[in-house]
Amino acid sequence: MLIEKEITLLQALTGVDFVLTHLDGKKIRIKNKPGEVIKPDEIKTVEGHGMPYHKQTFKSGNLFVVFKVVFPDSLKPEQITQIDQALSTQKSKTKDVDMEVAETCHMIQYKEFHRNTHHEGGQEGGHNSDEEGEEGHGHGGRQRVQCAQQ
């Protein structure tokens, strides 16, 4: 038997403890071990609490729980500070990264029209009017750049 259980990020990090009402009405309490972190889409097994075997109703198979971790949409600055302090051993050290870069970029939420579906990049027949560039080849007026051979 397989069930899907939605949990919060806090529960994923600190532990789950919930009651499942089985098909026969029996209620079972399900917990994970203290300190055990549950990752998104992780599958856990509850042995002997699945569906009963055919013609052996005194025996049951295993129950499988797929965890769907719900992440918050945003965090307040004070929450970030608290999380940073709590998980400071996990945080990658920025000192190890070369911070002298040409440009800093920020990510945005993915939208379907962001896909690069055309084999030369961009979208064929997409939303941009500059795609039909020089001589109608769909290069948007951009030049092709080739690497110099050494």
Image (cartoon, rainbow, N blue to C red):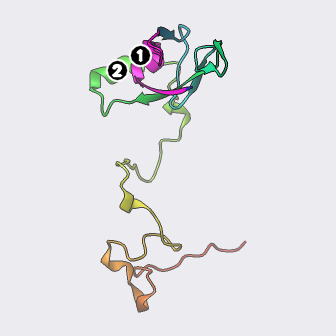
Q: Is residue 123 above or below residue 18?
A: below
Q: Is residue 143 above or below residue 150?
A: below
User: Which sits in the foreground, 44 or 80?
Assistant: 44
The span shown in magenta is: 2-26
Q: Residue furthest bottom?
A: 135
Q: Is residue 65 above or below residue 105?
A: above
Q: Quadrant of residue 138?
A: bottom left
Task: Please tell me whether residue 78 belongs to the stretch shown in magenta.
Answer: no
> SS for tag 1?
helix
Residue 37 percent coordinates (x, y):
53, 18
Quadrant location, the C terminus: bottom right
Q: Residue at x 42, y 71 (%)?
A: 123
Q: Which residue, given by chain and number where applicable, does mark 2 sit on?
A: 81
Q: Residues within 10 Å of mark 1 (few under 14, many from 20)?
A: few
Query: What residue type is disc 2 on?
Result: Thr
Residue 85 percent coordinates (x, y):
41, 16
Q: Which residue, given by chain and number where applicable, does mark 1 sit on?
A: 85
Q: Residue at x 34, y 20 (%)?
A: 81
Query: What residue type is disc 1 on?
Result: Gln
Tell me if label 1 and label 2 are in contact, CB under 8 Å.
Answer: yes
> SS for tag 2?
helix
